[in-house]
Image (cartoon, coloured by chain):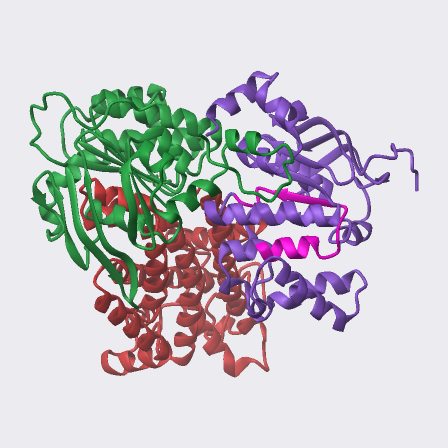
Chain colours: A red, B green, C purple
Amino acid sequence: MRGNLVVGGTLVGLVVVTALVSFVWTPLDPQAVDASVRLLGPTSDHLLGTDKFGRDVFSQLMVGAQTTLYVGIVAVGLAAAVGVPLGVLAAMGPRWLGELVMRTSDLVLAFPALLLAIMLAAVYGASTLTAMIAIGVATVPAFARVARAGTMQVLSREYTLAARAGGRSRWWIAWRHVLPNISGMVVVQSSVSFAMAVLAEAALSFLGFGTAPPTPSWGRMLQESQELLAVDVRLALVPGLAIAAVVLGFNLLGDGLRDRFDPRLEARR
Amino acid sequence: MTSTADSATGDVDAGEGPIVAVRDLERTYRGGVHALRGVSLDVPRRGKFGIVGESGSGKSTLVRLLAALDRPTTGTITFDGTRVDDRRDRDLGFLRRRLQIVFQDPMGSLDPRMRVRDIISEPLGRTRGRDERVAELLEAVDLPADAGDKHPHRFSGGQRQRISIARALAPRPDVLIADEAVSALDVLVRQQILDLLTRLVDEYALTLVFVSHDLGVVRKVCDEVAVMRRGEIVEQGPVDEVYDTPRHEYTRELIAAAPTLHGALSASPTPASTEPAQPES
Amino acid sequence: MTEHAGAAELLNVDGLSIANGDVTLVDDVSFRIAPGERVGLIGASGSGKSLTASAIMGLLPDGMSPSGSVTLRGRELLGASERDLSRLRGKDLGMVFQEPMTALNPAMRIGRQVAETLTIHGTSRRRAADRARELLDRVGLPERTAGAYPHELSGGQRQRVLLTIALANDPSLLICDEPTTALDVTVQAQVLDLIAEGVRDRGSALLFITHDLAVIASVCERVLVCRDGRIVEEGPVADVLSAPAHDYTRRLLEAAL
């Protein structure tokens, strides 16, 4: 479906642009507290109003996009950097190694990511970094599995046999045949995992184990809005919708990419 | 069709005797599947050696063992006087240069992400004059010179098999194994690829090991044949002898089952008769 | 129904063309099959031979549009409603495909799949189960086959099951699309025998599609040679194969074994 790709790409693109713009410009200082303008509704000065400290919600939202993307990129990057080599190794290495990797990833999968994050936060203090690491570690098995399955598929093709018969080493086969041919799957997995990472970061910040104040984060915006739900739903709605949009965007993008990669590869085999 | 026998005239580089010698080869897979049970054969130097068998006969396993892509459970394989069955991958360099394979699947045997140039030069390693060699090989298999820049999906099944052949010839091997190399092709394309293969084998004085389920094709190409069933060689000898006076019952059965034009036309004024086609005489 | 077709005709394909967008894949193909006649359709892959069979069955892939006329006993099949077609398929038209695994339901026991073909077209449930076992026995499958799932059978056995299903309702036309290409030679010979026997016993006509001349020669009476979506030559098998008129047929013959 082209539609998935377009809608997903647009949503993700919007967030990326917002985050990039926020580095150089925001309408107001997102951290500037001003008691005189607390809990304002949308005005010309404050496009999305202000929160209980009088901070500009729109500016916070923009800078929050940075946090969201930052966490996603680092967590997914970490997961892919560890998971993909592990998965390839599990498929190409000796049988016991494959078993070990897969059983370990079962274990990690069974261990709740939130609990891991809370443990890390308890030991090292709550921060964006601990959240990223926890989310990244919890996502490693997803990549390891995808990479292992993809590698086994590639290894069943005769071109890897031909490479061996041509005197090429395992490293060469992994580098020249396996990685290029599983890259599509890894990209798709990245997109889907990105959505999950964003969600996880929001949840952690909401619980107070993620991004620490005063750095703006969508999850913490949600949390701060909690006590004011009865007063003004807007404060919960704005970060909530932003999170939903990003998650939807990455999921659609993942679906779209999957559709793009898979049929083409099938047709060309 | 193939008149010259295996006895090549005045070999300079090669020693005497068979180039590949297989003795009492067994391969048992996990779970106790006996893919090969005691196979012995000699592939004569510069001969065209056919291996015929149906699915499950063990011929694919045999190919892997011959190419040292797998290890036998017991038994030995000697390549030009050197044992290869007990060596580690890194000690098989000489075999990788001197023995090459053309695979069956014209799709699956070429990496869709690689350019044809890189596919063909893959067995070459780090050598100078790669581009010249690729151009030479493309010409040898009758592909246009600009084929090297493209990806495999741009080519037809027959052309892909030419690419596969070019790759196999790249390191100037002595032995070429064709593993069902024409089985996935249409009749007309199959004929072209067979012609190409036999031409190249003669031109470069190669030893050909031609593996197929198709008796007709083997008869066309080879001068010696081994018939396999359930991991064993039931009969082997000169092609004409095996086809015209098969000694083993299974060989007779195979020959009787293979439809041939001559047989079908001469044997059937009533084509609906349930007789299987007769072998051509 | 208009019964304008000649009395002796079973299938009449007249000016059949199939296009996919702007590309014409089958171009003005016409041929007839008489009741009980065994006709071979030969050609290389991409010659349009399988599409022709799909058009007759009403099973063309989405996006392909047929034109012309295909009549079975005078009844037009092109553009017929899916309901009418499905009533014909399995009853008047039987089909055997190249890849039997994809043509069988992997989650249903063989016996039920055969019986279902019978019940859909009016046999009572109890009789169908018995008849299914009987039919499976007729193609030489052991009794336990009825209780097996498709993946438990070999390629040759699956092809026998497909043939049983295709012939279950004594169709007037059996279409075989490369039914033995994926099989070993000895198994191929058995399946070919069963096909020939099956249509002869039932008086069914046969349209046999393959790229293998030798197979056609051993099964069919008449042959159509298909190339680039056109029929370039046709005639009795013995005539065409001993004195081919078209250059393409000659090349096919030279390449045959």
Please say if B102 is above or below C225: below
Residue shown at 15%/36% (left/top)?
B97
User: Which residue is located at x 52 percent, y 24 percent?
Assistant: C253
For residue B16, above or below residue A159: above
* Residue A152 position within the rendered picture, expressed as x and y whole percent measured from the top left: 33, 56
Which quadrant is home to the C terminus of chain A? top left
Q: Which residues are magenta?
A: C160-180
Depth check, front residue: C148 or C205:
C205
Q: Position of residue B219 (x, y in %)?
A: 36, 32
- Magenta region includes residue A147: no
State left or right for residue C24 relative to residue A263.
Answer: right
Residue C58 makes an appearance in the image? no
Left or right of C245 on screen, residue A205: left
Q: Nearer the viewer, residue B159 or A46?
A: B159
The residue lying at 46 percent from left, 69 percent from top is A55
**Horizontal placement of C138 versus A235: left or right?**
right
In which quadrant of the rendered view does residue C174 lie? top right
Q: Residue C218 occupies which quadrant of the picture? A: top right
- Above or below, B88 against B224 in this view is below
- Residue C102 percent coordinates (x, y): 56, 54
